[in-house]
Amino acid sequence: MFYTVTFNPALDYVVHPGTLTIGEVNRSRGEELYCGGKGINVSAVLAELGIRSRALGFIAGFTGEAIAKGVAEMGIDADFVKLGAGNSRINVKIKSDAETEINCQGPDIPPEAVDALFEKLSVLEPGDTLVLAGSIPSSLPPDIYERILAAVDGRGIVTAVDATGELLKRVLRYRPFVVKPNDRELGELFGRELKTDAEIEECARELQKAGAQNVLVSMAGSGAMLIDSNGITHRVGVCKGTVRNSVGAGDSMLAGFLAGSQSGDYGCALRLGTAAGGATAFSDGLAKRELIFSLLTQLEEQGGN
């Protein structure tokens, strides 16, 4: 079983005003409403790839109920901790000439709710996969990722971490199965601007030395790189298509990689992850199965290792 944790899920309200004029009344040409949050995104794309997962995290108020309903409609089994006060956040995505996002804070998460999450994590069994993705709300302890990985350490649980900065550095000692920085985030970890494949590979291998088993690096328009647990470097180019959406592409890549890695073929896992990320980037919402496999065929025809 796969489990994903989203500490601060949201309703993503996407607005298309055509043009946006600050200080004036702007009228929308259309809107969409999605259940958002990095872990939820991973669960949604796993579902498209035929893999069952359970979404964990915290929800509150009427917006939290809407998130729970939306996640269920996506075919995802959810077991959220329901908070007694506040409302889950609504994030606004304004898509005009440029894409503008307003991400809200969300509810406070009290210690007893954290305890309830750990109780839900206690049922994980050897062979299960746990995905931790995204930033930590200010009301949570800053070491929450470390505490979770410490709680599952030594239990035969596969862990995946999509985080940045110190949050990522602090969990490497627990030897996560995969970490997924993008090239900019990877450079920031080492105080460098990475411009070449050789520089990206050098820093990715440093993360591996620090404990990560597999290091998956997304590189926007340049494709992706993987340093696998055998020390082999894999490189794949970018999918061809028209970018329509920047939200959830990295989460989709992680989901595709995790799905593909079950075969033990890391080259295949990298291609499936890249195809899933591209399918989200080329869609209004998250990746759908048909487009994922269409792009996977495209990547396989391009070659790569």
Image: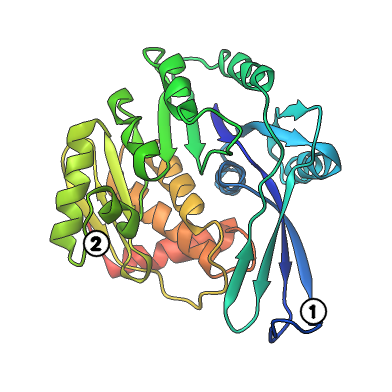
| Residue identifier under label 1 | 28
User: To which residue does mark 2 refer?
Assistant: 304
Front residue (pair 23, 13): 23
At label 1, the amino acid type is Ser
The quarter of the picture where residue 59 lies is: top right
Disc 2 secondary structure class: loop
The answer to which quarter of the image holds residue 244 is: bottom right
Question: What kind of element bears circle 1?
Answer: loop
Q: Nearer the viewer, residue 212 or 156?
A: 212
Q: CA distance from mark 2 to mark 1?
A: 43 Å
Q: Position of residue 48 (x, y in %)?
A: 60, 49
Q: From the viewer's perspective, is 265 left or right of 80?
A: left
Residue at x 81% of width, y 82% of height: 25
Decide: is 7 above or below 28. Answer: above
Identify the residue at horizontal 50%, vertical 52% (top origin).
252
Which badge, 2 or 1, comes first in the chain's sequence?
1
As drawn, 78 above or below 280: above
Give percent across and percent down for residue 124: 54, 17
In the rendered image, residue 228, in percent from the top left (x then y), is placed at 24, 41
Q: Amino acid at mark 2?
A: Gly
Q: Quadrant of residue 171?
A: top left
Q: Nearer the viewer, mark 2 or mark 1?
A: 1
Whether 253 is drawn above or below 31: the answer is above
Q: Is residue 33 above or below residue 3?
A: below
Can residue 263 be seen here? The reply is no
- Which is nearer the eye, 11 or 22? 22
Quadrant for the C terminus in the image: bottom left
User: Is residue 257 toward the left or the right of residue 199 in the image?
Assistant: right
Q: Quadrant of the N terminus?
A: top right
